[in-house]
Amino acid sequence: MPAIKLLIPDDYQNIGPELAELHRDPGYRCASVGDLARLPDADAVLAETHALLLIRERTMVDAALLARMPALKLVSQTGKLARNIDVDACTRAGVAVVEGSGSPHAPRNWPGC
C-alpha cells in the first residue's frame, strides 16, 4: 500500500518537522510548507496530497483549492472550524472535514481570579 501523504500548509512556525509522531509511521509521509502560495511545485504537491492538517485559519480550503487536489480525502483543522474551510465544497468533493476541540480563549487560572 502506498504511503498516505499529509501536508501541513502555511506552517509559518515550521513546526511540522518537529512533530515526531507524524514521522514515526512509514505508512505516512508528512511535509510542511511555510507559504503554500510561494511553493514553486505547489500544483504537483497538492495533486498528490491525501490529507491536509491546518494549524490555523491561514489556508483557504475552497472549491478552487479542492480542484487542485484530486487525491484529497481529509481536512483536519487543529482548532474549531472557521470560515477558511468551505464545508459544502468539501462535501461535494467527497472530502471529510474534522476539527479540534477546546476553546480559542485561554483560561484565567492565575491566583486571585
Image (spheres, helix red, strand yellow):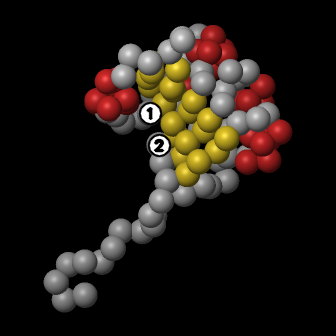
Q: Quadrant of residue 14?
A: top left
Instruction: Say whether disc 2 or disc 1 marks the residue closer to the N-terminus.
Output: 1
Crowding around mark 2 (Cα neighbors within 10 Å: few <14, some 14 to 19, many 20+) is some
> What is the x, y in percent for residue 52?
56, 33
Task: Tell me whether circle 2 and circle 1 mark residues in contact (CB < 8 Å).
Answer: yes
For this orientation, the residue located farthest to the front is 1
Amino acid of disc 2: Ile
Whether residue 5 sits left or right of residue 71 in the image: it is: left
Whether residue 28 sits left or right of residue 51 in the image: it is: left
Image quarter hosting the C terminus: bottom left
Element under label 2? loop
Element under label 1? loop
Residue underneath mark 1: 11
Instruction: Depth check: give the residue in front, 68 or 20.
Output: 20
Whether residue 38 sits left or right of residue 12 in the image: it is: right
- Residue sitting at x 74%, y 40%: 90
Whether residue 113 sits left or right of residue 80 in the image: it is: left
Instruction: Depth check: give the residue in front, 70 or 14.
Output: 70
Using the rendered image of the protein, determine whether residue 38 is visible from the camera's viewpoint.
no
Crowding around mark 1 (Cα neighbors within 10 Å: few <14, some 14 to 19, many 20+) is many
- The image shows residue 40, relative to residue 35, as above or below, that is above
Residue underneath mark 2: 55
- Residue sitting at x 38%, y 16%: 26
> What is the x, y in percent for residue 69?
70, 23
Using the rendered image of the protein, determine whether residue 17 is visible from the camera's viewpoint.
yes
- Residue sitting at x 48%, y 48%: 78
Amino acid of disc 1: Asp
2 or 1: mark nearer the eye: 2
> What is the x, y in percent for residue 31?
45, 21
- The image shows residue 5, relative to residue 54, as above or below, that is above
In this rendering, the count of numbered labels is 2
Q: Quadrant of residue 11?
A: top left
